[in-house]
Image: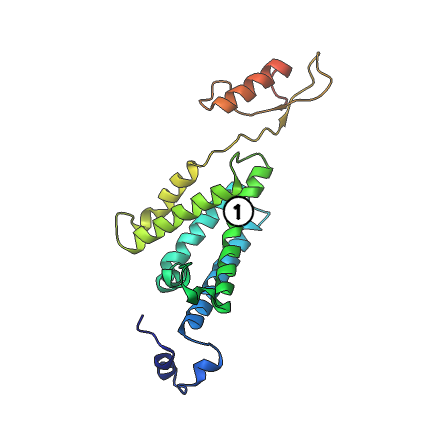
Amino acid sequence: EALSLRKLAELSGVSRAAPYHHFADKQALLAAVAEQGFAELSDLLHGVVGNEQVALDERLHQAVLGYLDFALEQPALYELMFGQALWQADSASNQTPSTLQFQRTAKDCFRQYVHLFERLQGQSLSPQSPLRSAQLLWATLHGLAQLSRNGLFVKREDLADIAAHALAQFPRRPACVAPCRLSATSAWPVSCCRWPTSSTNPSARRCASAAASRCGSPSR
């Protein structure tokens, strides 16, 4: 709140008028800094999401840890990126070109998580809406980051373990990728789940039971 373009000019050793050649006002400056923060976070997530050498579940885990590291290693920037000053919808200052551009960059960053959940859904690994899953995950990560930054009950050394538990709450479908041998009464192969009929997951039990009744045990 105490920051002003004049004060910034003094700290930078330039004339008081110099910042106004680049930023219309303080709001424009804050939006530019926060936009750069989201661009940096987006690049980090893009590198993780696009790494085809790593399994999708592991990419999701790496994206979670990368987000938390970013939030805790750059607390002032993170606070600005998610602060009310740049997000209050009823504020006239948030309808300026600089702020609207910042918000577009922030939403593009969020879409990295949506794309990852879309990939998981495409491989039948997640039965839920990619958008809702991404929203829930981001809300969880933001809460963890804020609690840890504020020194509340979340210790930084526990974040990785808590994040793993959070990810475990997202439903996963078993990957039905092991083809069955053809049965005597079937003219087509049937995909069988690897999960046993004794699984505690109802969907997994139904899938495994159906596979066993159609074509016996999966081929190896």
Where residue 11 appears, as percent x and y from the top left, is 35, 81
Above or below for 38 versus 210: below
Q: Residue at x 38, y 39 (%)?
A: 165
- Check disc 1 and report the residue beneath it: 114
Which colour scheme appears in the figure? rainbow
**Residue 155 location, x and y as percent?**
29, 49
Q: At label 1, which amino acid type do we have?
A: Val
* Image side of residue 105 versus residue 7, left or right: right
Identify the element where label 1 is drawn: helix
**Which residue occupies the extreme bottom position in the image?**
15
Query: Which is more toward the observer, 219 or 203?
Result: 203
Q: What's the residue at 70%, 12% (across, down)?
A: 185
Front residue of 203/24: it is 24
Residue 41 % position (x, y):
47, 58
Q: Can residue 44 be seen in this view?
A: no
Q: Residue at x 39, y 40 (%)?
A: 166
Disc 1 crowd rating (10 Å Cα; few below 14, some 14-19, many 20+) is many
Label total for image: 1
Question: Who's the residue at 51% across and 46% down the image?
Answer: 59
- As drawn, 78 above or below 56: below
Position of residue 180 relative to residue 37, above or below, is above
- Residue 27, x across and y down, in percent: 41, 70
Q: In this view, does 187 lie above or below 117?
A: above
